[in-house]
Image (tube, helix red, strand yellow):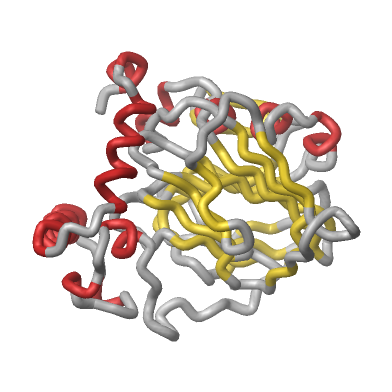
Amino acid sequence: MGVWLQYLLPKQALTRLAGFVASRRWGAATTWLIGRFVARYGVAMSEAALPDIGAYASFNEFFTRPLRDGVRPLAPADLLCPVDGAISQFGAIEGDQVFQAKGHRYSTTALVGGDASLAARFQDGHFATLYLSPRDYHRIHMPCAGRLTRMVHVPGDLFSVNPATAQGVPGLFARNERVVCVFEGEAGPFVMVLVGATIVGSMATVWHGVVNPPRPAAAREWRYGEGEGESVVLSQGQEMGRFLLGSTVVLLFPAGPMRFNPAWSPGGAIRMGEAMAARH
């Protein structure tokens, strides 16, 4: 889809329609749709816990399918890759600026929904932007152990998040709808931002369930632990959320020593559980 066309399309309406279709239980029609999708995108059903496409009652059940035990072993690393997909960008945050694509940057404050005090914790820190294509496994896992402190749903646009759009839409990941999850880990705070996109029917977390819809005009915030709500502590590699249709995860880490996996490069394929970075 051309970038210019995305400015004209009714993206919210298309996304609502996609969410409706994906949630329907239409029997043989659903199985036919899943089969077409598997063939079109080359989905590796041999890795799924349920490889038979007829086992899924809805497209959403298929899209958020779990994997077989053992197909994503966890590497012995400080930070693990949280998703299957491709590397969009990664590296140092320059002041408060995150590199999106050639000629495009955005601020950490904009990314987290305007909270300057939260963004300041990642001044001159590190980031990774990871893209999940339609063929990928769409559950999101923890890069390290962490205690959840806040979750913010930030309303926004629903542009595609594919590489071509990232090169053509300024501030893409800080203008699309997103769910900002703030954690405290052994080495300090970190943020996982689940970015919505055109046709992404919803995003969900393991502690809350489906976050969107609804899609109100104003941001919504939840706080956790220390007398402000339920305590949510997740271990390294544990599932933390999922996309209903594909999108992008942006991770923020504070300043300090960090060495990304030397095999990583923009555009390269990644798998959940592989080593992402070392903190020394």
Please report the residue visible at 76 percent of the width from the left and 44 percent of the height from the top: 125
x, y percentage for residue 259?
69, 58
x, y percentage for residue 214?
51, 38
In-front residue for pair 6/93: 6
Q: Is residue 164 above or below residue 52?
A: above
Q: Residue furthest bottom?
A: 70
Please report the residue visible at 84 percent of the width from the left and 57 percent of the height from the top: 188
Q: Is residue 142 above or below residue 133?
A: below
Q: How many marks?
A: 0
In-front residue for pair 257/190: 190
x, y percentage for residue 266?
47, 46
Is 33 on the left or on the right of 273, as rendered? left
Is 228 on the left or on the right of 207, as rendered? right
Asked where in the image residue 113 lies, by quadrant, the reply is: top right
Quarter the N terminus occupies: top left
Please report the residue visible at 82 percent of the width from the left and 52 percent of the height from the top: 256
Q: Looking at the image, can residue 266 be seen? A: no
x, y percentage for residue 243?
44, 52
Is 227 on the left or on the right of 45, as rendered? right
Q: Is residue 237 above or below residue 218?
A: below
Q: Looking at the image, can residue 112 be seen? A: yes
Asked where in the image residue 226 lies, by quadrant, the reply is: bottom right
Quarter the C terminus occupies: bottom right
Please report the residue visible at 38 percent of the width from the left and 27 percent of the height from the top: 12
